[in-house]
Amino acid sequence: MTTLNYLLLLPLLAAIALVFVPRNYRVVMRLAALVATFVTMLLAVKMFWQFNGATADANGYKFVCTIPWLGAESLGIACKLGVDGLNVGLILMGAIVAFAAACCSWEIQAREKEFYILLLVMTGGILGAFASLDLFFFYFFHELALVPTFLMIGVWGRGERKNYATFQITLYLSIGALIALVGLIALYLQSGANTFDIPTLTEHIRKNPLSANAQHFIFPLLLFGFGILVSLWPFHTWAPLGYGAAPTATAMLHAGVLKKFGLYGLIRIALPLLPQAAQSWLHVVAFLCLGNILYCGLVAMRQRDLNLLIGNSSVAHMGFAFLGIASLNLIGITGAVVVMIAHGFLAALTFGLSGYLYRHAGTLTLDQFGGLLRRLPFVGAALVMAMLAGCGLPGFANFIGEALVLFGAWKSFSLPTMLAAWGGLIIGAVYMLRAIRSLLHGPLPQKWDHLPDASNLWRKLPFVLLLGALLFFGLLPGSLTEKIKPSAEAMLALANGPTAKEDQMVLAPVRSPLLRPEVIKSAVETQR
Amino acid sequence: MNSSLAILEMAVIALGLALLVLDLWTPPERKRELGSVAAIGLALIFVFSFVLENAGPKGLNITQENIRLFAFNKMFVLDGLALFFKRFFLLAAFVVLLMSVDFADRIAAGIAEFYALVLFALSGMMLAASANDFILVFVTLELITITFYVLTSFQRSRLRSLEAGVKYLILGALSSAFMIYGIALVFGMANTTNFAEIVAAGKPVFAKPLFRLGLLLVLVGLGFKIAAFPFQMWAPDVYQGAPMPVTAFLAIGSKAAGFVLLLRVLFGAVPEVTLQWTPLFVAMAGITILYGNLCAIPQRNLKRLLGYSSIANAGYLLLGVAAGSAAGSSAILYYLSGYLFTVLAAFTAISVVVRHLDDEDISAVAGLHQRSPLLAATLALAMISLAGIPPLAGFFGKFLLLKAVLERGATQPLFCWLIAVALVGIVISFYYYLGVVRAVYWSKGPPDASPIEISKPIKWSLYGCMAGMFYLGLFPNAFVNLTSAAVKVLRF
């Protein structure tokens, strides 16, 4: 048993325990959820802290452990958990967001028992999905979080289009997940390794790469399956509506953490195991991600509802992660992972704040607000900081991620990078600043005179925590990037085949049809 | 000759006859308790089946050592597959009997006969699990079907129940006629009805067109039992009209009996023909999945919804037949076991909820979470398992089926299309299964908010079904080994 074991089992066991608590013990429910997620968070921090000192196994994974009984030996399925640089930060982020979400759940006043059970199951599923080193459980844990999402939005959700949004998000996500599942099973069958264990599979495929045909069959399944889960343009329409209808905690967990599952799957599985297909598909990704950044950015600009604005901006931010993945070099991939983590904190923070506002004001229509900064100094200030972080202001972790992605991607795809930088910086700044203006500045309408600020520590804690995390990783990015680097290098060594990393950087632009030969030549020369 | 091998079936029949005799001495107000007696009897027989498992020479384990024991002139076989399904049917009948005890006040008269008929149908299913001869296939199917004609129309005062009985009778008789005609053709060409002898006869017989025609007609009969396209027409009407425990028994027992016979015939008697007919099974599976799922979308009646869902599930199970491999057949067994717990949980919960209502409209479960959290959770879990979402049994079953089909997809592109169709079907099914979950948890205004009383046996059978769903979904290892050992007797 390692820290990781407890980290994953704690929320799930707490959920099981809550089933047996009578439903009128409301305080117990809330307390149990808070304690369970808090301890989980502490364990995640401890694991993150100890990461560099921990001993790695032969494949570079640390804290490796197996949960016995789960799984089927004869099929090569075992519930194996472990972390390396790619997921250690994601797990930390997931645990912190889960605790923040539990803190923000004070707004739930009906059927607390079911809510907290579902919240804990969702937390367990999320952490499991990122921690598992087994293809089957990787998928299993992600799907475990699907039903809680459905029920939480349906029962405690808000807005007139709640029913529609509930079914849309659930059906859309299950389509994506099922497509990815077929890809994963096909990968298992094609490898011939007869195991779902990711390290063993990786090792096996490194020695016996899959045939080009198989790769070209499986990679699109994974790309679009995972892409739907991450709201890759044009499969993004579920996200803003779904998040708009979701209760605060669900939106925080889903937009913040669960959505990153698809990106993580691409980095962990699709790129290293299907290198040849990846290289021919990545320029498609590089252009699709512009759809996220530009199209959804422009859509976000026109939103009159704060939640829809945040939802669209969160889709837009995913574009940067895709661009980083498409770059397929060390800087870009590191940047993509940092973007995933930073955006997790940011999305949770913004949805937490908008949830707070909705709870007290009963609406999120931007026209109806104004001058809130005077009434809500704390919440308003946190919102300003979140919006500025969303624009990519230096000092916040988002800046580090986006800058790394742009640096990394410039070498492979200069045109998309240019457009992405333009879109991210200008469009992003426009809608974020406009939101700040219409919400926080200007005259304060009389009806908001009664709006209370986050008064006590409990209300402030989740926002302080998330902002603190954003600033910490923004000011000390090395604590993250140093951990990511070795694992990203190992992954890239596989994704780029036996050739060295430098050769690949030359290769990538050659495949991009939009670049002229002289540009490639100069890129190669600057490289050398 | 070793007729003691059929001891389980004999015990079940003896139990049924004893019940009829006991009925004569039981005062009317206590007659419903006979169902509990029968259930206890089945539990004992279930335990005894584990003793029978070591019936091999020198006490060897039949399933693990892949031993086949024959009786009645090799018409009857006792092997791992047979034992697996016998236990399956015993478990199903056990829960169905508990359900019937709860349901007894809705049956006007003759409750003891009702219990006895359930037991006779059970004996037919258990014999079907051991069929090694086309004659036994026909006899067991008739035993099952004819008892179901009676059971379906048991609520004589309900028009719907009678209608269901008549529909089932007419279509069932038609399919039986097709089947016996097919068996006659098979016998005419192969000069035998025994599976082992047909396999031994091999190619020269398999190549005869009339033999194939006969086989096709046998498939019609079996297709009717499992409610696969194009023989599914009866399912929704009969499911809706039949008394609830009968619907549950039809959904799980009768379907599983159809599948064990299908496996026995296709992979026990004519494996080579089955291989050549792969496109036929692929088409059947694909169309059945789409038909069941698409028709289920607009349904408002819960039993009818489950009727269409059972058609769709027959399609999923046919994926395993189409795959035509050991992995596929083992997946069928696994999926059926998960389906057993899931369907029984769903029907038991619905049966308790609609106790005082005339109709099983979906609005009956509105606000169920307030009236009975246990029933609400059971129904929701059953729907989630049917939809195939982890961590429940339905997910692992679907996973195994998809994996089996994808294995074949590497060599035959046809199977990739089948996978695509199956995915479409699964996504559609999310819509209506989750629609039931929505009705349970957040639809508007329950018509009647009084708490629902649940009797002890029903409560425990609900717990049991939930435990089964979680066990098969979370800890599949032991059971996967069991199912793959059980299908070793089949030829691929």
Image (spheres, coloured by chain):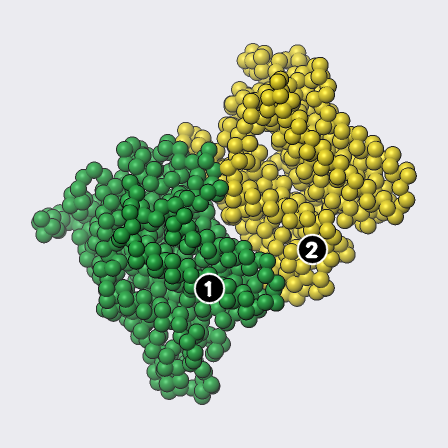
Estimate the x, y position of residue B307 in percent, counting from the top left.
66, 44
Numbered disc total: 2
A523 lies left or right of B366: left
Residue drawn at x 73%, y 46% as measured from the top left: B99
From the image, state the color of chain A: green
Q: Kindly indicate whether the residue at mark 1 contacts the one at mark 2 (C-beta within 8 angstroms).
A: no
Residue drawn at x 46%, y 74% as measured from the top left: A358
Q: Which residue is mark 1?
A: A35
Residue drawn at x 83%, y 38% as measured from the top left: B113
Between B114 and B419, the one lying in front of the other is B114
Estimate the x, y position of residue A345 in percent, counting from the top left.
35, 64
Name the image quarter holding residue B190.
top right
Q: What residue type is disc 1 on? A: Val
Specify few, some or many for label 1: CA neighbours under 10 Å numbering under 14, 14-19, or 20 or more: some
Whether residue A66 is visible here, answered yes or no, is yes
Whether residue A244 is visible here, answered yes or no, is no
A105 lies left or right of B240: left
A372 lies left or right of B293: left
Query: Which chain does the numbered disc 1 sit on?
Result: A
Spatial CA distance of label 2 from label 1 is: 42 Å
Specify few, some or many for label 2: CA neighbours under 10 Å numbering under 14, 14-19, or 20 or more: some
Name the image quarter holding residue A367.
bottom left
Q: Secondary structure at mark 2?
A: loop
Between A279 and B18, the one lying in front of the other is B18
Residue B361: image tag: 2
Q: What residue type is disc 2 on? A: Asp
Same subunit, tags 2 and 1: no
Chain (yellow): B
Residue drawn at x 23%, y 52% as measured from the top left: A485
